[in-house]
Image (spheres, grey):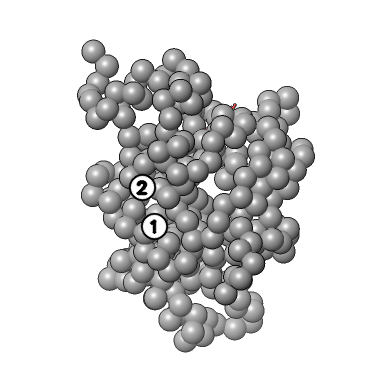
């Protein structure tokens, strides 16, 4: 039990740039454990950069990220990334079960085969994401949404407490979106912390416990009604807000 309430992710003064381009400026925020959090903001606002910085894929100019109070270097395996659908070319003949089992590789010495425990952890994770019946299929034969669920299983098998997903709903159909959302809820119920880059403001309030609104800087972090404030969105989305206010009102296309 976590009696001291240490945040799952604590970001302090995080500043990241690509050469001369400043992508993130002085971001400080603490994300509590066991939440489903959405990162929102216009294109190019630094959402993917924030995810990469939390994973330790990028070296910040300034600031730091802590995972359950520990520096990133000491949090290996506790944070997992679920790649975007289509981000991986699955031409080679690896099965769904083998992908889930890859989550165990950090624990398996090179000289031995996976144990019964490793297989059990992989299979349990596939149950959680409702992909157990596909376990002998080749990963390349699955739809993008199913592939994402297998990657979520791999992260669970690894024992990761924090999962980061970059636009998991991009380009999936409505049924797949529901399926992924259900898996996210199940993982939250299992105590995981989930951080999801999301571009659709119309569904943001329904899907997430808390929203993090960024455009280089942190504009807001908190419950959706507070973050989806019209004035705040006008400031962050500028000219694009007209489109979004239609979306928020549930109306159709631009005339
Ligand atoms: N590898 C890179 N090299 C140079 N600039 C980059 C790179 N990745 C992202 N950027 C720039 O950093 C800013 C933030 O990008 P990104 O984090 O991808 O935003 P988002 O995910 O919100 O669309 C943008 O201005 C983008 O052009
Ligand atoms: Mg992005």
Q: Quadrant of the C terminus?
A: top left
Please tell me whether mark 1 sits on a helix, a strand or a loop: helix
Foreground: 88 or 76? 76
Ligand 1 shows up in which quadrant of the image?
A: top right
Q: Position of residue 38 (x, y in %)?
A: 46, 44
Q: Specify the quadrant of the image occupied by residue 202.
A: top left
How crowded is the residue under tag 1: few (<14 C-alpha within 10 Å), some, or many (20+)?
many
- Image depth: mark 2 or mark 1 in front: 2
Please tell me whether mark 2 sits on a helix, a strand or a loop: helix
Residue 184, numbered label: 1
Work out how far the residue at label 2 is from the one at label 1, CA to CA, in angstroms.
10 Å
Foreground: 107 or 79? 79
- Taking the image as shown, residue 19 lies to the left or right of residue 110, namely right
In the image, residue 208 above or below residue 46: below
Toward the top, the furthest residue is 255
Toward the right, the furthest residue is 62
Determine which residue is flagged by label 2: 207
Q: Position of residue 34 (x, y in %)?
A: 49, 61
In the image, residue 252 above or below residue 2: above
Foreground: 133 or 190? 190
Task: State whether label 1 is within 8 Å of ligand 2.
Answer: no
Residue 142 visible in image: no
Instruction: Name which of mark 2 and mark 1 comes first in the sequence.
Output: 1
Q: Specify the quadrant of the image occupied by residue 24.
A: top right
Task: State whether label 2 is within 8 Å of ligand 2.
Answer: no
Q: Quadrant of the N terminus?
A: bottom right
Q: Residue at x 40, y 48 (%)?
A: 208
């Amino acid at each position: 039990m976590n009696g001291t309430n240490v945040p799952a992710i604590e970001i302090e003064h995080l500043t990241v740039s690509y050469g001369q381009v400043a992508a993130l400026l002085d971001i400080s925020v603490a994300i509590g454990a066991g939440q489903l959090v959405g990162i929102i903001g216009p294109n190019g606002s630094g959402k993917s950069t924030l995810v990469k910085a939390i994973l330790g894929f990028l070296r910040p100019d300034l600031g730091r990220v802590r995972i359950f109070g520990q520096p990133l270097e000491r949090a290996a395996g506790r944070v997992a990334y679920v790649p975007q659908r289509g981000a991986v070319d699955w031409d080679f003949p690896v099965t769904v079960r083998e992908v889930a089992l890859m989550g165990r590789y950090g624990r398996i010495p090179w000289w031995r085969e996976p144990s019964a425990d490793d297989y059990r952890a992989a299979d349990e994770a596939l149950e959680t994401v409702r992909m157990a019946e596909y376990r002998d299929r080749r990963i390349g034969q699955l739809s993008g949404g199913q592939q994402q669920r297998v990657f979520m299983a791999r992260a669970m098998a690894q024992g990761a407490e924090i999962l980061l997903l970059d636009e998991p709903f991009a380009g999936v159909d409505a049924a797949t979106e529901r399926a992924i959302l259900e898996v996210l809820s199940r993982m939250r119920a299992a105590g995981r912390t989930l951080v999801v880059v999301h571009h659709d403001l119309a569904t943001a309030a329904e899907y997430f416990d808390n929203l993090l609104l960024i455009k280089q800087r942190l504009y807001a972090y908190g419950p959706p009604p507070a973050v989806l404030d019209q004035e705040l969105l006008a400031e962050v989305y500028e000219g694009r807000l007209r489109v979004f206010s239609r979306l928020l009102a549930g109306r159709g296309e631009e005339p």
